[in-house]
Amino acid sequence: MTLDKTNPQKFSLTTPLYYVNDVPHIGSGYTTMIADVIARFERLKGKSVLLITGTDEHGQKIERTAQEKGVTPQEHCDRIVTRFDELWDKLNIKYDRFSRTTAPRHEAIVKEFYQRVWEQGDIYLAQQQGWYCVACEEFKEKRELLENGCCPLHPNKQAEWRDEENYFFRLSQYQEKLEDLYQKNPGFLEPESRRNEILNFIKGGLQDFSISRINVEWGFPIPNDPKHTIYVWFDALLGYITALLEPEQEATLDNALSQWWPINLHLIGKDILRFHAVYWPAMLMSARVSLPQRIFSHGFLTKDGQKMSKSLGNTLNPFDLIERYGSDAIRYYFLKEIDCGRDGDFNETRFVNVLNADLANDLGNLLNRTLGMIKKYCQGEGPQITGENLPLEHPLKAIGLDLSERIIHSYETLRFNQGCEEILALIRASNKFIDEQAPWSLFKQGQQAQVEGILYAVLESVRLSAYLLSPIIPNLSSRIYEQLGFLVDFNQADQVNQIVPFKQHTQWGILAANRVLPNPQPVFAKLELPAEETS
Ligand code: MSP
């Protein structure tokens, strides 16, 4: 089976739809930051982008949480959803759609989809027996559980025994088609280690899975048997499709699939791999819907090696972090310090050190002192030189000329850490260059042309770095561009490609000679640990 082509001018991507059992933590923020960076990068290239995020609001986990709090499930969901929205705003996430699975339009899509699968003969009634982890909303094999009867992801939540009648989806029918999908499309699921994991899982033999519950009221009723509700995962995955509807469109599958489907990229964490990489493609095949282009599974944020999660109580409060350090700093740290396909630990001291070294010292100070020298040595005007005047073997030009190509590749392959390191290599080379060349001495010796050549090359390298980092640190990049005399806000997604065209601004050497530059201002203040952390 080969995947359908997508429109090269459009790019649609999703974060998972987050459970609203609790307020968001930094783990939820991690997937969404990655998604926002990719969306911004695609917009910078000039594509029309649809970034979908949202919330997964049905199921037993939410039903129980609401009960414990003494509110109705809907009241509970409405309360928590505002916290997600607030967090996305504070993290400077520019999403296009927020898909809530309790939306009435979503019910229409779920029912139509269910009907298609039913008509395909892929749904039947049978007895379900097994261990259920409510926190995962998933049945587990006995051998998957720890000695204490909990699943490894929720070591303090007992799996519960279930023996009830459920509707099942004939996943087993799709065994061969799924194997074929993975054999023919190596890029469908990344990283490779996850692809191998899933391929082994499929080859091990697929079992049908239950898609209804009789003991859970908080969900959509099964159309032909309303004493059952639809299993939360069957419902939630379809939230990606509902999100594609335009606000005024009637909620039908055809409408939803007409403009943005197939989704270009589903971004997920490794704990929800099977749902996305096995169940979801099979459900789509059954309903005769083409498949998404690509799934990428990132690792976990850990604290002392353990997945950060609300149920373990080892999370970081993202609101506090943003309050203390600002959104750019947090985005930069998580994108630069963690290899996206692997787990990564958070440590606040390290966080502050990395930010101060990379953004305050290497980048911010470099810009500030270069601009200071330009004011002093170039009669208050920009250097009277352009990139073309400098030889190809110029140490900064030599790095700068093909840097963008490599960075574009790292964004497209989600190797953000590598991309950041490559950009930092140019920034560090620029610091070294200015120190070695000592333009202050050359100025005293009357070597004006040389001084201007040095300052130009450094300034241009800072500009290119800021441009390439703009999907990650849009506020800082905007401030740097402002210091270079450009009026651009990298947060204005719709305009940015017209104001700073991608083809032009990814070149090294585009700064015009004699550019009027504003007075130098610091662009990134040094971060400090809160008092109790330093003592
Ligand atoms: N509701 C489902 C997803 C349905 S998608 C149709 C769900 N929700 S979740 O809120 O539990 O998790 C959402 C995402 O957050 C997952 O991709 C998960 O991997 C991610 N993270 C939750 N904790 C995390 C870390 N500690 N680290 C990194 N990501 C983590 O699953």
Image: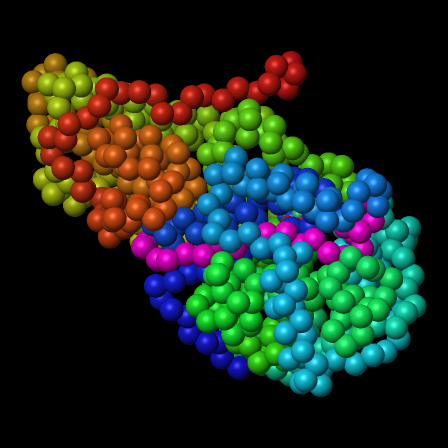
- The answer to whether residue 176 is left or right of residue 43 is right
Q: Is residue 214 above or below residue 364?
A: below
Looking at the picture, the colour scheme in use is rainbow
Q: Quick one: 148 or 104, which is closer to the camera? A: 104
In reply to whether residue 523 is colored magenta, the answer given is: no
Toward which corner of the image does residue 120 lie, by quadrant?
A: bottom right
Q: Quick one: 382 or 453, which is closer to the camera? A: 382
Q: Residue at x 53, y 19 (%)?
A: 528
* x, y percent for residue 33: 52, 45
Q: Is residue 148 above or below residue 245?
A: above
- The answer to whether residue 99 is left or right of residue 425 is right
In reply to whether residue 61 is colored magenta, the answer given is: yes
Q: Residue at x 22, y 23 (%)?
A: 518
Toward which corner of the image does residue 363 lie, by quadrant?
A: top left
Q: Residue at x 57, y 20 (%)?
A: 529
Q: Residue at x 63, y 57 (%)?
A: 103
* x, y percent for residue 450: 11, 28
Toward which corner of the image does residue 393 lie, by quadrant?
A: top left
What residue span does the magenta drawing correspond to?
45-66
* x, y percent for residue 65: 80, 45
Residue 413 visible in this rendered orientation of the protein: no
Q: Quick one: 81 or 288, which is closer to the camera? A: 81
* x, y percent for residue 426: 32, 38
